Amino acid sequence: MDNGHIAGAAHGTYKSYLIGFILSVVLTVIPFWMVMHPTMAPSTIAISILGFAVVQVLVHLYFFLHLNTSSEQRWNLVAFAYTFILILFIVVGSLWIMHNLGYNMMLD
């Protein structure tokens, strides 16, 4: 019977989706609370939010997109890593170029 699923593709269980959802909510609420009730330096809050964002991306990749290190998912993992590196190069390169332009265009 054809149920629209690809044979051998990973599918989550109700429990894994629920765990992913709860983790996503927690990883969203904590940074929101940190911003609404600042008890640390702004730079510390910004770094913490960045850390929570990275963890939340990993939670989404694992629990919702079922991306893991199994042999069936190896090429998906390679494609994701390549995309991440490419985006990192573009963002860091753009920031570097803008910083150098700003520094070199300063008039006294």
Image (spheres, helix red, strand yellow):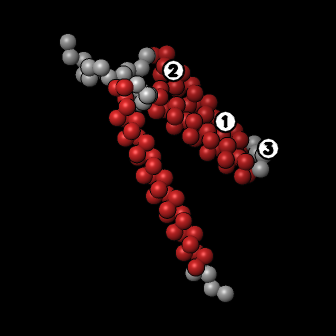
User: In the orientation shown, which residue stands out farthest toward the top?
Assistant: 1
Q: Position of residue 22 (x, y in %)?
A: 57, 25
Which residue was labeled with disc 1? 30
The earlier-in-sequence mark between 3 and 2 is: 2
Q: CA distance from mark 3 to mark 2?
A: 31 Å
Q: Residues within 10 Å of mark 2 (few under 14, many from 20)?
A: few
Q: Position of residue 23 (x, y in %)?
A: 58, 27
User: In the orientation shown, which residue stands out farthest toward the left?
Assistant: 1
Quadrant containing the N terminus is top left
The earlier-in-sequence mark between 1 and 3 is: 1
Q: Residues within 10 Å of mark 3 (few under 14, many from 20)?
A: few
Which residue was labeled with disc 3? 39
Three-letter amino acid code of the residue under disc 3? Thr
Q: Residue at x 62, y 81 (%)?
A: 106
Q: Secondary structure at mark 1?
A: helix
Q: Residues within 10 Å of mark 1 (few under 14, many from 20)?
A: some
Three-letter amino acid code of the residue under disc 2? Leu
Q: Residue at x 37, y 26 (%)?
A: 71
Vertical position of residue 91 compared to residue 20: above or below? below
Q: CA distance from mark 2 to mark 1?
A: 18 Å
- Number of disc labels: 3
Q: Are marks 1 and 3 in contact (CB under 8 Å)?
A: no
Is 25 on the left-hand or right-hand side of 5? right
